[in-house]
Image (spheres, rainbow, N blue to C red):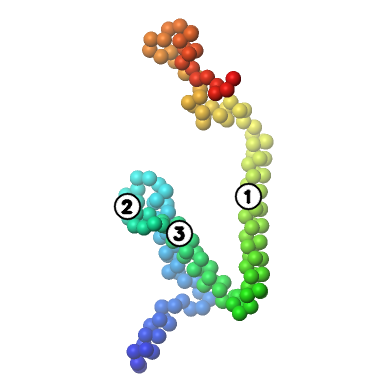
């Protein structure tokens, strides 16, 4: 066996069999997702070892790149690259399918939220009280403020009258 045929046999053995998933890409995508999680939760001991510290990009770019490679490997053989017009039509059909799925999910989510708010109406005071604590008047008298005029002067006022 010559060196050339041995090298080509070695390359052939490292490629996945047609029709099977390449689990190496899935492992790399999982590692990218793990790095994205570590980067988004502050105070992690592993955050100093993620990609954001070693270059101009982070793990989200790696995830998108690996996902694109996986899509190309999965669907690349289905398309005839010689006929660019049919390839373009198939790609736009896929874009349309994904757009319809995305919009359907978004509209269903909005419909569920709207229905939930209609069934469980929240008074505006209860809705905003938790989020705007800094705009609530201070009911405790500060040290040294005895009369009502001093308390009124210290309360927050509306921005516009």
SS of the residue under disc 2: helix
Q: Quadrant of residue 116?
A: top right
Residue 50, x across and y down, in percent: 36, 55
- Mark 3, Cα crowd under 10 Å, few <14 / some 14-19 / many 20+, is few
Query: Compared with residue 93, is residue 83 higher up or lower down, i.e. above or below?
Result: below
Label 2 belongs to which residue? 48
Residue 58, x across and y down, in percent: 41, 56
The reply to whether discs 1 and 2 touch (Cβ–Cβ < 8 Å) is no
In terms of depth relative to the viewer, which is nearer, 51 or 21? 51
Q: CA distance from mark 1 to mark 3?
A: 25 Å
Residue 135, x across and y down, in percent: 51, 24
Residue at image position (49%, 68%) is 69
Label 3 belongs to which residue? 61
Query: Which residue ends up furthest to the bottom in the rendered image?
Result: 1
Can you see residue 146? yes
Label 1 belongs to which residue? 106
Depth check, mark 3 against mark 2: the one in front is 3
In the picture provided, is 4 more to the left or to the right than 97? left
Q: CA distance from mark 3 to mark 2?
A: 18 Å
Can you see residue 34? no
In terms of depth relative to the viewer, which is nearer, 53 or 39? 53
Residue 129, x across and y down, in percent: 54, 27
SS of the residue under disc 3: helix
Residue at image position (49%, 17%) is 155
Q: Quadrant of residue 160?
A: top right
Which image quarter holds the N terminus? bottom left
């Amino acid at each position: 066996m010559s060196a050339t045929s041995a090298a080509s046999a070695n390359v052939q053995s490292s490629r996945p069999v047609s029709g099977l998933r390449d689990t190496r890409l899935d492992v790399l995508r999982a590692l990218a997702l793990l790095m994205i999680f570590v980067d988004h939760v502050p105070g992690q001991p592993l955050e100093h070892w993620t990609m954001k510290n070693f270059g101009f990009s982070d793990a989200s770019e790696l995830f998108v790149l690996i996902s694109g490679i996986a899509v190309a490997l999965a669907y690349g053989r289905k398309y005839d690259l010689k006929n660019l017009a049919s390839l373009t039509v198939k790609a736009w059909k896929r874009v349309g399918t994904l757009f319809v799925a995305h919009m359907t999910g978004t509209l269903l989510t909005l419909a569920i939220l709207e229905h939930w708010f209609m069934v469980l109406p929240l008074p505006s005071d209860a809705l905003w009280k938790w989020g705007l604590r800094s705009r609530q008047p201070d009911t405790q008298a500060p040290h040294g403020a005895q009369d009502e005029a001093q308390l009124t002067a210290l309360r927050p006022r509306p921005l516009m009258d």
